[in-house]
Structure formats: structure tokens, C-alpha cells
Image: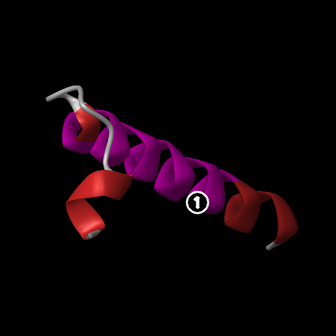
Amino acid sequence: MFGKLLPREGNFFEMFNQHAERIVEAARAFENLVT
């Protein structure tokens, strides 16, 4: 069932990892802003 939730494109996990890297980068920038 979980496989049906994933997109058909093969680069899903690559895009997911790129998004996670952006989130980490934004979190660090926010931390620097408030400290």
C-alpha cells in the first residue's frame, strides 16, 4: 500500500533529500537570526 503513495517518478527520493537540505539550511539561518 505504501508504494501506491509514492510518485511514479524515480527521482522522488533525490528531490526529497534536496528539500530536507533546504529545511536544514533554513533552520540554521533562523537560529542565527534569533540568537
Tell me if residue 18 is in the magenta stretch.
yes
Residue 28, given in percent of the width and then of the height, sits at 58, 60
**Number of marks in the image?**
1
Q: Is residue 32 left or right of residue 12?
A: right
Q: Is residue 14 above or below residue 30?
A: above
35 is higher (above) or lower (below) than 12? below
Secondary structure category for the residue under label 1? helix
Give the residue furthest to the right. 34
Q: Which secondary structure type mostly characterizes the magenta part of the structure?
A: helix
Report the residue marked by disc 1: 28
Q: How is the image coloured?
A: secondary structure
Q: Residue at x 45, y 42 (%)?
A: 19
Does the magenta portion include 22?
A: yes
Is 8 in front, or is 11? 8
* Along the line of sight, the residue nearer the viewer: 17 or 9: 9
**Residue at point 70% right, 67% down?**
31
In-front residue for pair 30/13: 13
Give coordinates of residue 20: x percent, y percent.
42, 52
Q: Residue sitting at 14 percent across and 29 percent down? A: 10
Residue depicted at 49% across the width and 43% down the height: 22
Q: Nearer the viewer, residue 23 or 32?
A: 23
Q: Is residue 24 above or below residue 12?
A: below
In the rendered image, the quadrant that contains the N terminus is: bottom left
Q: Residues within 10 Å of mark 1 (few under 14, many from 20)?
A: few
Q: Which residues are magenta?
A: 13-29
Q: Residue furthest left?
A: 10
- Horizontal side of 20 relative to 27 (left or right) equals left
The amino acid at mark 1 is: Arg
Split into 4 quadrants, where in the image is the C terminus? Answer: bottom right
